[in-house]
């Protein structure tokens, strides 16, 4: 099994927990771990589930060809699994992945690139929909992470984030170091206005760094939760 992929149940117990349909299949929703975009819907059987867990790459069952298929085996558009969960009824899987290239055979990043809503409806509801997915005082971090993921994917000309990604890891690390030093100076100066400004810059550049390294903010939050759950020593 991939070292990056963890599962709580042994495979045999997981297979018994899942509610397979009459054809021995279960739908699997694939989601980008960084942007949270839903990429595709496919089906797994027992064998493809086993291969997915063993290899850490997505394997599915093709209903049209009646055969197993490994996503990206021919196109190179692979999907490395970070987590695999099942819903409350056990009849749907949610697979979070780091993807290499588009998920859709059309070349689109997601298979869900078409909409039934009008452009006007979509524009009016976009902001509210995004905010509703991450409630609370840290919602802006989720929105900023998603925006950075979009910049990484689309690389709009003239955007500062595009400039950082184009320059690469060394430039991003240099900026993280500079903003860290400036935050320290602001704190030493006792200037909270300056400190607020510099720490905001630091957090932004850290999120750019996480995206460059394909490390979702959710992984950081889970690590903090694990540390919080450890027995206190004080």
Image (tube, helix red, strand yellow):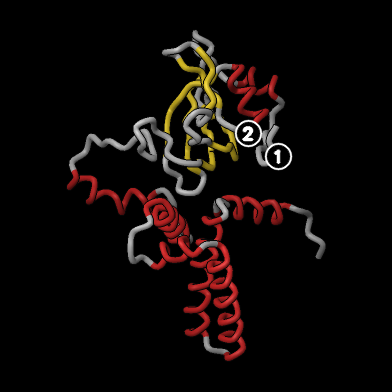
Classify residue 88 as left or right of residue 161.
right
Q: What residue sits 49% from the left and 73% below the top?
A: 201
Identify the residue at image location x=58%, y=91%: 189
Figure quadrant of the C terminus: bottom right
In front here: 76 or 89? 76
Looking at the image, residue 106 lies above or below residue 157: above
Q: Is residue 69 left or right of residue 156?
A: right
Residue that label 2 marks: 56
> What is the crowding at mark 1: few (fewer than 14 residues within 10 Å), some, or many (at least 20)?
few
Question: Quadrant of the rendered structure where residue 231 is?
Answer: bottom right
Q: Quadrant of the N terminus?
A: top right
Q: CA distance from mark 1 to mark 2?
A: 8 Å
Q: Looking at the image, is 230 positioned above or below residue 47?
A: below
> Residue 232 at what x, y percent from top left?
78, 59
Task: Point out which mark residue 110 bears.
Answer: none
Question: Residue shown at 57%/89% (left/top)?
Answer: 190
Q: Are marks 1 and 2 in contact (CB under 8 Å)?
A: yes
* Residue at image location 39% in from the left, 33% down from the top: 104
């Amino acid at each position: 099994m991939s070292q990056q992929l963890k599962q709580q149940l042994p495979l045999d117990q997981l297979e018994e927990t899942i509610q397979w349909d009459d054809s021995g299949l279960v739908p699997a929703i694939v989601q980008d771990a960084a942007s949270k975009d839903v990429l595709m819907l496919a089906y797994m059987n027992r064998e493809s589930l086993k291969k997915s867990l063993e290899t850490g790459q997505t394997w599915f069952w093709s209903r049209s060809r009646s055969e197993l298929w490994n996503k990206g085996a021919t196109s190179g558009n692979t999907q490395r699994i970070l987590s695999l969960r099942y819903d409350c009824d056990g009849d749907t899987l949610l697979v979070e992945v780091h993807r290499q290239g588009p998920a859709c055979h059309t070349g689109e990043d997601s298979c869900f690139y078409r909409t039934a809503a009008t452009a006007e409806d979509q524009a009016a509801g976009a902001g509210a929909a995004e905010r509703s997915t991450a409630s609370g005082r840290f919602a802006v971090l989720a929105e900023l992470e998603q925006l950075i993921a979009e910049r990484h994917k689309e690389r709009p000309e003239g955007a500062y984030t595009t400039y950082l990604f184009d320059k690469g890891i060394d430039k991003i690390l240099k900026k993280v170091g500079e903003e860290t030093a400036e935050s320290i100076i602001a704190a030493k100066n006792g200037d909270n206005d300056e400190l607020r400004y510099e720490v905001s810059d630091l957090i932004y550049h850290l999120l750019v760094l996480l995206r460059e390294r394909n490390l979702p903010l959710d992984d950081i939050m889970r690590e903090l939760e694990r540390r919080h759950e450890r027995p206190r020593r004080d």
